[in-house]
Image: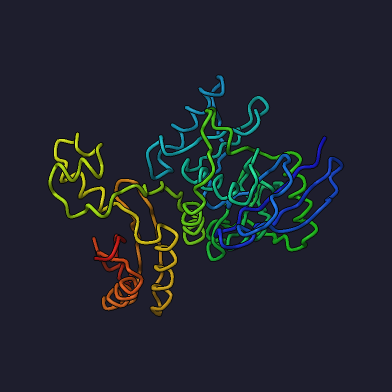
Amino acid sequence: MKPVRLILIPATASQPAPFLIVGADGHVLERGELTLDGDAAPEPMRTVAVTPGGDVLIRWLDLPAGNPAQSRSAAAWMLGEQVATTPDRLATVLGPPAPPGEPRLVAVVSRPLIQAWTDYLAALGVRADVMVPDVLTLAGPDAGDTLSAVRFGEGMALRGRRFAATVQSDLVDLIAGGRRVEPVQDPATVERALVGAALAPAINLLDTGEREGRAAGGWKRALVLATLAALSPLVLVMAAAVRDGVAAQNARAETLEAIAAAAPDLAREPDPVEALRRRVAAAPPPGGITAAAAALFTAVEAVEGAELDILIADPDDGMKATVSHPAHGEMAVIRRSMAEAGMAVTETGTLEDGGRIVSDITIGAGR
């Protein structure tokens, strides 16, 4: 058996990605970190990527007998009420077949997020053969009333008997539900668990039962998605890339001739002018998604008590975000900061929640 690379996908793409190279005998041959600005391409080898577990729903289900496709369909139906999006946006992945009478490991993850992780790894110069959530690198304890706890970045991975979840640290007691939590703080113990996952991963999130294209080149999208995962680790990130091909120089042109010259596909629309307006509204801000995310993070951090709850990039609706803040006036400060970066912020909804203001906004090019 050839060496295997195990790489930990960080919470944000700006952070380095730690890796181990493990020999067939389980010894660690090399330790290091990969960065997006690395000079040399890593050596090609089998690669197991450890993903943030907070974005993966993990359950053990009693599935009816059937082939893999039937089992996936049954699992997706059983978990339908526990996810907040349409089934076509999700991948349902099966663990190894269980002994008769035993429940089977099942994981559900966002398809766009799998692609984002793939794009990020491609930007590092590696391709994952296996993706496994961080919490499933841990072995379940024998006692049913005990949870092992290991910190991965900002998340706390909790592993019990037929239980696995990565949560925010302040939610550990709530999720534990009275079970005893045993922190695993010895780095050597954690490394041994990672070595075991490299040689025998518990599940492969890429095994969706379909041959899906995983072309590289969209790592800027991965930055936004990975950042969102860090901000809200219990939410499955449902986002897709915003197309960059809008001809902004014709945004004000409302004649069919101008639209046909700038975007011939829109000339075939029933209302080409309205179609052009929709596309311009969904266009990425100056500098693309990465620049907009960085500008928004800076603007929010400058307001005391403000928090960025959700950031979404959607091909039809453009960039959207949800910001919570102490008082109504703070959004004006954020708008001014974004305007200085050449971007426009439009509030689409505001409500009060527990003494805080929650504002839904869209982010576009400044006028």
Residue closer to the observer: 103 or 76: 76
State the scheme by which the image is colored.
Answer: rainbow
Look at the image and tell me in which quarter the C terminus lies: bottom left
**Count of marks placed on residues:** 0
Query: Percent position (x, y) of residue 176?
Result: 58, 56
In the rendered structure, the answer to whether residue 320 lies left or right of residue 190 reads left
Query: Percent position (x, y) of residue 244?
Result: 37, 49
Look at the image and tell me in which quarter the N terminus lies: top right
For residue 20, above or below residue 106:
below
Q: Quadrant of residue 98?
A: top right
Q: Quadrant of residue 301?
A: bottom left
Judged from this view, the residue extending furthest toward the top is 66
Query: Percent position (x, y) of residue 36?
Result: 60, 57
The answer, for residue 53, to whether it is visible in the render is yes
Residue at image point 75% right, 56% down: 190
For residue 150, above or below residue 206:
below
The answer, for residue 141, to whether it is visible in the render is no
Residue at image point 17% right, 55% down: 252
Query: Percent position (x, y) of residue 253?
Result: 16, 51
